[in-house]
Image (cartoon, helix red, strand yellow):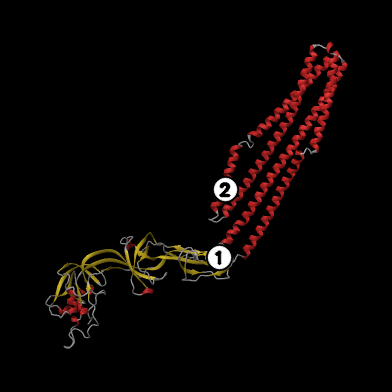
Amino acid sequence: MNDAQTRTIRLSRLAIALVASGALLAGCMGGSGDDPDPATAAAAYSVVTTGEVASTIQVTGSITPIRQVALASNLTSAVESLNAKVGQRVSAGELLATMDTTALQRDYDDQVANGARSVVDAQSAVEQAQQQLNDKQQLLNNNLDPQLNGAEQALREADRAYADAQRAYEQRLQRKASGLNADIRSQNLALAQARSQLLSAALNAVRAGLDSTTSALRGVDRSAEIAETQAELAKLQVQLQQADEQEKPAIAAKISAAEAKLDAYANEYPLGIDQAQANAHIGSAEAVNSLNQAVLALNDQQAAVQRTLIDTDRELADLQRAAAQKFDAKKDAAVALETTKMQLQQQINSDQQAIRSAERAKQAAELQARQSTSKLEQQLSDNEVRAPFNGVITSVAAKAGAPVSGPLMTVADDSTLLIRSNVREADLASIHLGDTVQFTSRATGEQRFTGEVSFISPVANAVVTSGKDGGSVTADTSNQSPEFAVEITVTGNRDGLKIGGSVKAEITTESVKGVKTVPRDALVEDGDMSYVLVVNDEGTVEKREVTVGKTSVTDAEITGGDLQAGDVVLNRAISNLAKVGETVDVPDSVRKQQQGDASPATTSSTEANKS
């Protein structure tokens, strides 16, 4: 709180010549004849010159850095080493403290080991699935698969049996050719065509079933990929909630990629299956339908031939019936062989799908291993606490060997110093950004420093008081004089200024150059009139009326009256009123200063003897 804040008018009399002589001569007005009159002492006079007048507002405040940061660690372990103390200067990146990571390193090592075991197990599953596929491929490539070989042998035997039966039928048919009508020949051709169509339809039905099964396996793969992506997305969303600010961008990018992948699936398969899978199911149904139609056609053609042959030659009919049976056996063997091939292909497809599943499981294990260790790796890398910028340590809460739950220390950037102060509402309109400031601090005594106003708060400071329950409440300030925060940036020399030190400052709100000034105690005020005691060229003291402008505790601006630059006035005019009309002996040093021969004094006006 700025209890000592006052408003004054400071007159910076840059060109006012003030004469400061030695000690005042002893004695009072009317002393012994041997004692000189006090009015004859050089310290009793001031020479009027033109200078600068400045209006100022006095404030008090404290010195603060431009910024300061509380340094903390993400770890809750003990402080292993500490290289920081209050007042210590630091450079950006300088190591200030390290945290104990013994327990964290142990957890990290366990996670790495567990993750490695999971990855090894998953890799073994991939290799086993690949080996199983390789074994089957090798059997097929070398014609060593017993199931396939048996089916092929059965087809060959059935094909020979059918060929023998068909040949016996055709030989008998040749011998009886002269007695057969043309219908038998055309029916035999139609029968052969029907058998061929049935065989093709049966094989197509088997192949269509494989296509449907293969498409179903692809659907299983896709469903597995969708389920894995959805599970990964849910895991990433949980991680995003628990992540710190540095980790969030990378996790958010992974979430976007997973969502894009799911959207692509949804756009490609709006009904849950792709077009190829749908076509495979349709093709399978069509193949079965064609097979049924071929069976009916063959049965009809077979019956027609039998009816014709029975009427012509029963032995020929029996041979045709035997050939039909052999054809059924051949057809069944062909279907069995094709089914065996398809089953083997399905097994290969299933093994390939198992490999893909095992590879996905391996990828998931690797991802889980990375995720389980990534946060621990980040924490391990956070064991060092370093200075964020060049500056000075202003507080240290940490102790070596002790755990911490809050900031370890605070580092201030003192490359720029600020003075934080408060001003009254009545003074606020007079202060502007950029106003120049002069101030002193307790630590540096009377040494003056410079600054400028860099911030004026548009909001009054809240007055906080204690509530009935001990808590803080904001008090009603309607009956109090509000204050506003002001910041002053220190400019120029700053040697000796200390962070946290108290200062007294004068904010220059207005400045006028080229005006006449006299010491305040050179004025005699009589009601509305003001006078000064002037020593004329003959050395006689005259009382002259003047008009006074701005005044301060020590000086006054003269805006009118019979007073010119270069005139000599008596200080402590009230004490020297009796000298009006008398002749005084002005010291030579004052006369020289009046004539511009002496350098102006830089100290404030010196008062005349009080006696």
**Residue 553, picture quadrant:** bottom left
Within 10 angstroms of label 1, few (less than 14), some, or many (20 or more) residues? Answer: few
Horizontal side of 412 relative to 427 (left or right) equals right
User: Which of these two is toward me, 414 or 240?
Assistant: 414
Residue type pointed to by label 1: Ser
Residue 329 makes an appearance in the image? no
- Horizontal and vertical percent position of residue 427: 32, 63
Residue topped by disc 2:
255
**Residue 265, picture quadrant:** top right
Q: Residue furthest right?
A: 315
* Up-down relation of residue 263 to residue 549 (above or below): above
- Horizontal and vertical percent position of residue 392: 46, 68
Indicate the quadrant containing the C terminus: top left, top right, bottom left or bottom right: bottom left
**Residue 610, picture quadrant:** bottom left
Residue that appears at 22% across and 79% down: 43
Residue topped by disc 1:
405
- Horizontal and vertical percent position of residue 131: 73, 46
Q: Is the C-beta separation of discs 2 and 1 under 8 Å? A: no
Within 10 angstroms of label 2, few (less than 14), some, or many (20 or more) residues? Answer: some
Residue that appears at 59% across and 50% down: 236
Residue that appears at 78% across and 37% down: 143
Q: Secondary structure at mark 1?
A: loop
Residue 347 makes an appearance in the image? yes
* Up-down relation of residue 142 to residue 42 (above or below): above
Number of numbered tags placed on the structure image: 2
User: Which of these two is toward me, 274 or 604?
Assistant: 274
Q: Residue furthest left?
A: 538
* Up-down relation of residue 299 to residue 511 (above or below): above
